[in-house]
Image (cartoon, coloured by chain):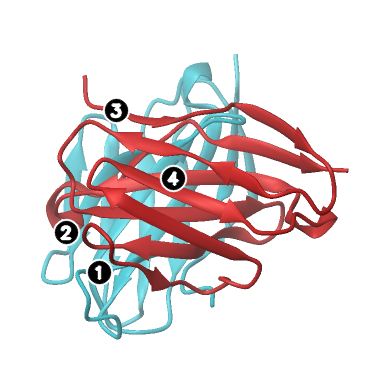
Chain colours: A cyan, B red
Amino acid sequence: SQQGEEDPQALSIQEGENATMNCSYKTSINNLQWYRQNSGRGLVHLILIRSNEREKHSGRLRVTLDTSKKSSSLLITASRAADTASYFCATDAMIYNQGGKLIFGQGTELSVKP
Amino acid sequence: DVKVTQSSRYLVKRTGEKVFLECVQDMDHENMFWYRQDPGLGLRLIYFSYDVKMKEKGDIPEGYSVSREKKERFSLILESASTNQTSMYLCASSKSQEIYGYTFGSGTRLTVV
C-alpha cells in the first residue's frame, strides 16, 4: 500500500539552481521524513518533520509540511552535481500503532548537470 | 560510525533454492525491517521486528520468512526462490524512528535465474 507519492518522478536541473520535490500522502501522520538514495545503494535519512511542524531547515535543505493538504515539499537550494540521487518521502502513518512503520513513496530522480 | 551491514552486495541464485539474506546492526536498535525495492513500485515492506524472536508481516510477506534470534541480526529467508523475487533488498534498523529515522544497509541485489 503506497502512502506517499512524489512529484515529479524525474527532475533535471543545472548546478546552482534550486530543486523542489513534492510528496502527497493519504492518511494522517505522526511525522514525515525525506531520504536520499545514490544509485544502487541504501537510503540515507535527510530530515524529519513532525505533524505539528510546518517548516524545517537543515543546511541547504528546506522541508515544508501542509497537513491540511496532506503534502510536503523538499527544497534543495544551490544544487550541486553531488546532489544527483533519488529522493524519497516516507510517512509514519497514524493507522499503524506498533512503534511506527515507515511507508515510502516511489521517489523523485534528481539529476544535477554541471 | 553506526552501521547496518548486509552480508552480500550481489547474489545470484537458482529457482527453487533456499536463500538467506543477512542483516546485522551495531547500534543496539530494537526495530529492524526488510524492504524490497523495484522500479516503479518504490520500497515495499516485507517483514519487520520490534524485538528478539518477534516478527510481524509487512505488506508483501508471501514467499518470505524471517528470523531474529539475536537483537543485532535480522535474517530474511526465501523458502523457495522464484524469478519474481529478483529485486534489490534493503534492511533498515531504528531505535526511535520518530526522532532519528531509519538507518539502512547498502542493499543486496538478488537475481534469481
Q: Residue B3 carries which label?
A: 3
**Element assignment for label 1:** loop
CA distance for labels 4 and 3: 11 Å
Mark 4 packing: few (<14 Cα in 10 Å), some, or many (20+)? many
Q: Residue B98 carries which label?
A: 2
**What chain is tagged by disc 2?**
B
User: Which image quarter holds the C terminus of chain B?
Assistant: top right
**What chain is tagged by disc 4?**
B
Q: Do labels 1 and 4 share a chain?
A: no
What is the x, y in percent for residue B102? 29, 47
> Residue at image x 67%, y 28%?
B10
On the image, numbered disc 1 is attached to which residue?
A100
- State the residue lying farthest toward the right: B113
Most foreground residue, A56 or A78? A56
**Element assignment for label 2:** helix
- Mark 1 or 4: in front is 4
Most foreground residue, A48 or B30? B30
Mark 2 packing: few (<14 Cα in 10 Å), some, or many (20+)? many
> Residue at image x 51%, y 55%?
B35
**Element assignment for label 4:** strand
> Residue at image x 53%, y 29%?
A38
Q: Which of marks 4 and 3 is nearer the N terminus?
A: 3
Q: Is residue A15 above or below residue A89?
A: above
Q: Are marks 2 and 1 on the same chain?
A: no
Is label 4 in contact with label 2 (beta carbons under 8 Å)? no
- Mark 3 or 1: in front is 3
- Mark 3 or 2: in front is 3
Which amino acid is tagged 3? Lys
Most foreground residue, B89 or B41? B89
Which amino acid is tagged 4? Cys
CA distance for labels 4 and 2: 18 Å
**What chain is tagged by disc 3?**
B
